[in-house]
Amino acid sequence: MKFLVCISNVPDTTTKIVFADNKGLNPAGVQFIINPYDEIALTRALEIKEALGGTVTVINVGGAGTEPNIRKALAIGADDAIRINAEPTDAFFVAAQIAEVVKKNQYDVILTGRESIDYNGAQVAGMLAEILGMPGVTVATKLDIAGTQATVEREIDGGKEVVSLSLPFVASAQKGMAEPRIPNMRGIMTARTKPLTVLEAVASEMHTASVAYELPPAKQACKMISPDHVSELVDLLHSEAKVI
Amino acid sequence: MSVLVFAENWEGRFKKSTFEAISYAGEIARQMGTSATAVVIGNASDEDMKALGKYGASKVLFLKNDKLNTLEPGVYTSILAQAAKSCEAKVVIISYTYTGKAIAPRIAVRLKGGLVSGAIALPTGLNPFTVRKKCFSGKGLTDVVVNAEVKVIAITPNSYKLNTGTGEAALEALAFTLNDGDLKVVSKEIKKSSGKVALTEAEIVVSAGRGMKGPENWGMIEQLAEALGAATACSKPVADMGWRPHHEHVGQTGITIGPNLYIAIGISGAIQHLAGVSSSKVIVVINSDAEAPFFKAADYGIVGDAFQIVPQLVEAVKRLKAAHN
């Protein structure tokens, strides 16, 4: 079984976001990590591979600066990696690049995270499924495969739904699908020699562009209420904030 | 040249996020000098569909088929694409719900359009078509220009006000041929959340953290939620320790919510937690530690012992509700 796991290079969850001239993230001092949801997808792919056999390839669309995190994915256990050498300008561009690789290499299962924590778009998985003409399941909390059939649990508004579908397919991972692994020393050592193929991007249309950035407006100072007058809070929420 | 809006329903019922999407589509249509057409897939009543006119839909294209009562992303995309073609839609509006997240990217690709997911306001301009959304998990805002001819906008629930008009939408059945082989994602089981109010749709959320000291102390949290008609949530450590189920975990790696009121009890307010709740309109923080970082992100705060404060809050809310009912 051939897995392709799409990984994104994103600022660590603790990053204080600073924009450079409102044109984009100021990367100074920012630690980049594998997008946490992508790491969940990677771990589940490895678990299934270990049970059923196969290979796990990771793919990233990004400049050479993403290679430390690609190596980390190899250290966690992926067999090989592909980097598309281009800035990921929008989700459609990224999906178009990955789709090109899928068409050539025929993967059985293509996984992404449910969204990246930088642009929070939740777009690549759905776009990939559509470009490739495959069934897709988004925000999946469980994934099991038996033969050519997959059983997937996905989030729906107000609960969860269990669905079944045939391989090949695309799914995006939500927390719950697997617990991320910490790479061990042997993994780190072998990651150095695992194949990492760099490919040039294919031409793609630019459907969207983020043109300006700003920080959200600062909150007004918190209004403190004495613990001896708790009912005052309820009155303020009712008459001032008008939320209850 | 209508604005098309997907009117999502749950077992035939429309919810507030659908009305918001229609209101949003109606306003964009008004600005563009055209009308909004809604698409309904599933078993909504004629009466409920006509009532979508109140929010700004002049027409409803509906498709009733028992095989389509649950989401099949590819088929839903085909239906929306057919509707978009029939009314030559250049703008398609979808709620940024779980269903919306499944179909918005597909419809964008199908129509060769550009997608902005998680929009939080009306376009700031129609030419170029520019829409604001959050980025970096709520830590930033970005303006996205859609260059493609077709614009697909997934609007964040609880971010746009409801339009309250009077009209009635005209109903028209959509002729769509469904072949059995089209249903590639087959629904096997629906598991409804046990909570009385679904977290992602809740207008009020009561959330608690490690400050509660143990799962046995959640009774008062549930009482407060019940008094307020709120959903319950929790912080990451609480879910990781198994005090509460994972589906209640809000934060950067859990569920992202944007209720009108978020009450955080015994949660210090790590940056990852804030990322999941920063869209909340009003934040109340109750914590025994006056230095808890959450107070900086809060609108109202009480420094004190939750075990003393929460029961008093429950009583105060009950008194308020009794006085106004």
Image: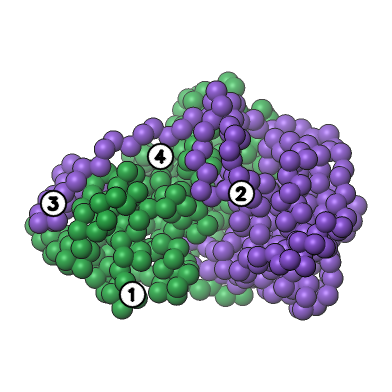
Chain colours: A purple, B green
Answer with left or right where residue B35 lies relative to residue B91: left
Q: Given this view, does label 1 or label 2 mark the residue nearer the observer?
A: 1
Q: Amino acid at mark 4?
A: Tyr
Q: Amino acid at mark 2?
A: Ser
Give the x, y percent position of residue A80. Answer: 84, 58
| Neighbours of disc 1 within 10 Å: few (<14), some (14-19), many (20+) | some
| Neighbours of disc 4 within 10 Å: few (<14), some (14-19), many (20+) | some
Answer with left or right where residue B35 lies relative to residue A201: left
Element carrying mark 2? loop
**Label 4 – label 2 distance at C-alpha:** 24 Å
Q: Chain of mark 3?
A: A
Q: Which residue is mark 4?
A: B160
Is B219 or B175 nearer to us in this picture? B219
The circle on residue B214 is 1
Report the quarter where the N terminus of chain B lies: top right
Q: Chain of mark 4?
A: B
The circle on residue A116 is 2
Element carrying mark 1? loop
**Label 4 – label 3 distance at C-alpha:** 34 Å
Have a look at marks 4 and 3 and say if they share a chain: no
Element carrying mark 4? loop
Q: Amino acid at mark 3?
A: Ser
Q: Amino acid at mark 1?
A: Gly
Element carrying mark 3? loop
Q: Is residue B102 above or below residue B193?
A: above
**Label 4 – label 1 distance at C-alpha:** 38 Å
Is B105 or B84 nearer to us in this picture? B105
The circle on residue A120 is none
| Neighbours of disc 2 within 10 Å: few (<14), some (14-19), many (20+) | many
Have a look at marks 3 and 1 and say if they share a chain: no
Q: Is residue A130 above or below residue A185?
A: above
